[in-house]
Image: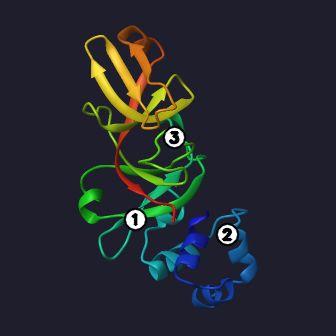
Amino acid sequence: MNRIKLLRLTHNLTQEELCKVINISQASLSGYENGKYEPDNKTLIQLAAYFNVSIDYLLGYDMMHTESGTKTIPVFRFVTSETLDSKSQEILKYEEISKSMAEDGEYIGLLMLGDSMEPRILEGDTIIIRRQSSVENGDIAVLQIGKNRATLNRVFKHDNGMILIPYNSKYSPLEYSNAEIEQLPITIIGKAVEFRGKC
């Protein structure tokens, strides 16, 4: 969702109400929210001041910091190293994390698809991921397998490779040798640190 529209809805404002505050036409605001064009510098400054966010955040270049010190992170449907580095990646929604978490590293949200991690993680749940390149045995992690495939599984490493184990017993574990890990390659994108139900 466009960040200007997200902020407006979060503050329970209609387009007409926000237009009066920053003195622009409703047609202009509609164009900003639909992504047809970007606000000029004066409007960006007014919006940033009114919503207490940075101009970088409004333009999609930064996360949102709130007055309470919490941080708003994006939630994605699918993540690989490539999609996370792309500005074209679709953001489904935003979730807040605590100030202490925000200071502990870089976080993203991921929407759970499928039932491979039931009963612990249900389809539609939001998974909070700390971006990191390694995890401990038994941790739940997002891994990239090859260029375009990503998976969420428990990770168990051993001398000869790695086993990825889902919670749902109807799915078989995935086992990879050290040679396969290097050849595909398989990389760890981040560790799951929190699960938030969809209800």
Of the numbered discs 1 and 2, the one sitting upstream in the chain is: 2
Q: Mark 3 belongs to which amino acid?
A: Val
Residue beneath the point at 71% across and 65% down: 34
Badge 2 density bin: few <14, some 14–19, many ≥20, Cα 10 Å: some
Q: Where in the figure is residue 143, as x and y percent of width and height?
A: 43, 32
Residue 82 seen in render: yes
Cα distance between the residues tagged 3 and 1: 19 Å
Q: Where in the figure is residue 181, as x and y percent of width and height?
A: 40, 16
The kind of secondary structure element at disc 1 is strand
Asked if residue 148 lies left or right of residue 34, the reply is left
Residue furthest to the top in view is: 179
Residue 55, above or below 139 = below
Q: Mark 2 belongs to which amino acid?
A: Tyr
Badge 3 density bin: few <14, some 14–19, many ≥20, Cα 10 Å: many
The kind of secondary structure element at disc 3 is loop
Of the numbered discs 3 and 1, the one sitting upstream in the chain is: 3
Residue 50, above or below 177 = below
Residue beneath the point at 37% across and 22% down: 163
Asked if residue 126 lies left or right of residue 130, the reply is right
Cα distance between the residues tagged 1 and 2: 24 Å
Residue 42 seen in render: no
The label on residue 79 is 3
Asked if residue 57 lies left or right of residue 188, the reply is right
Q: Which residue is mark 1?
A: 96
Camera-near label (2 vs 3) is: 3
Q: Where in the figure is residue 144, as x and y percent of width and height?
A: 47, 29
Camera-near label (1 vs 2) is: 1
The kind of secondary structure element at disc 2 is helix
Q: Mark 1 belongs to which amino acid?
A: Glu
Badge 1 density bin: few <14, some 14–19, many ≥20, Cα 10 Å: some
Q: Which residue is mark 2?
A: 32
